[in-house]
Image (cartoon, rainbow, N blue to C red):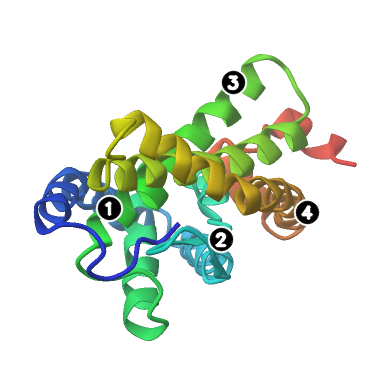
């Protein structure tokens, strides 16, 4: 879902930069605040960033000018809330653009918005909804990661549709076509990412239980009931 370098019109690149920048600045402040107030969180912050980098570096060919891949942003959103992921995702996307030719600098604003802003917020919304409904924690983690992934591809489809509307069916037709092509690879990837997220979260419970409790992700009264 990384839109390739130079693929979007200049006006679109500028607009997406303008939209994404405030979120990234706010996220940077949140990361700095978390690291200063809770130095013990630094390793977990690094792990969230590394998880996003590793998963989103898996690149599968998709729509011309873009690609399909897991995102990994849902886990960080659950652990540290979505604003943090706007900043971490920006760092990840810059490294990928410069070192892996995955995405681009001109399209960075658009890619940050889809993967680092829309994805984490929607994934986090599913996590919160799952908790309110009293569903098992694993269900919430699965939904958070799967829908952070799916919503990223949905937003990317809209971004591409805005840039390249269909001559006949217009924006709606173009978005539908992009979504249809993305879905072939993205839906299975989202399911796989959700399952992987559950496994990784169970590992985090074993190695970072006190930190998860402090963050409010794992309730103390449930800590001893982990299977």
Q: Earlier in the sequence, mark 1 or mark 3?
A: 1
Q: Between label 3 and label 2, give the one nearer the viewer.
A: 2
Mark 1 = which residue? 110
Residue 166: x percent and y percent? 31, 40
Q: Between label 4 and label 2, give the one nearer the viewer.
A: 2
Measure how far apart labels 4 and 2 are at the Cα level.
Answer: 19 Å
Along the viewing direction, whichever of 91 and 224 lies nearer the viewer: 91
Examine the rendered structure and indicate whether residue 10 appears above or below residue 212: below
Residue 44: x percent and y percent? 54, 61
Q: Which residue in the rendered view is the most extreme toward the bottom?
A: 99
Q: Residue at x 45, y 35 (%)?
A: 176
Measure how far apart labels 4 and 3 are at the Cα level.
Answer: 21 Å
Split into 4 quadrants, where in the image is the C terminus? top right
CB atoms of marks 4 and 2 within 8 Å: no
Examine the rendered structure and indicate whether residue 26 appears above or below residue 207: above
Q: Residue at x 56, y 25 (%)?
A: 128
Quadrant of the image occupied by residue 96 = bottom left
CB atoms of marks 3 and 2 within 8 Å: no
SS type, badge 2 = loop
Q: Residue at x 23, y 55 (%)?
A: 109
């Amino acid at each position: 879902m990384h839109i390739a370098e130079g693929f979007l019109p200049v006006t679109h690149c500028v607009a997406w930069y303008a939209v994404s920048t405030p979120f990234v600045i706010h996220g940077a402040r949140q990361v700095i605040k978390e690291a200063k107030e809770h130095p013990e969180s630094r390793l977990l912050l690094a792990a969230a960033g590394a998880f996003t980098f590793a998963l989103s570096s898996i690149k599968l060919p998709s729509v011309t000018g873009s690609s399909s891949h897991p995102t990994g942003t849902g886990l960080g959103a659950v652990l540290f809330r979505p604003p943090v992921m706007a900043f971490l995702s920006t760092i990840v996307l810059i490294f990928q653009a410069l070192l892996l030719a995955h995405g681009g600098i001109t399209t960075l604003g658009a890619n940050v918005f889809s993967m680092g802003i829309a994805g984490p917020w929607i994934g986090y919304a599913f996590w919160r909804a799952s908790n309110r409904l009293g569903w098992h924690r694993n269900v919430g983690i699965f939904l958070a990661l799967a829908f952070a992934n799916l919503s990223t591809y949905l937003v990317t489809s809209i971004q591409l549709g805005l840039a390249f509307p269909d001559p006949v069916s217009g924006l709606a037709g173009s978005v539908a076509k992009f979504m249809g092509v993305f879905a072939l690879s993205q839906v299975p990837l989202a399911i796989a990412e959700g399952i992987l997220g559950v496994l990784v979260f169970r590992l985090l419970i074993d190695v970072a239980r006190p930190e998860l409790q402090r963050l409010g992700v794992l309730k103390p009264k449930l800590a001893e009931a982990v299977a």
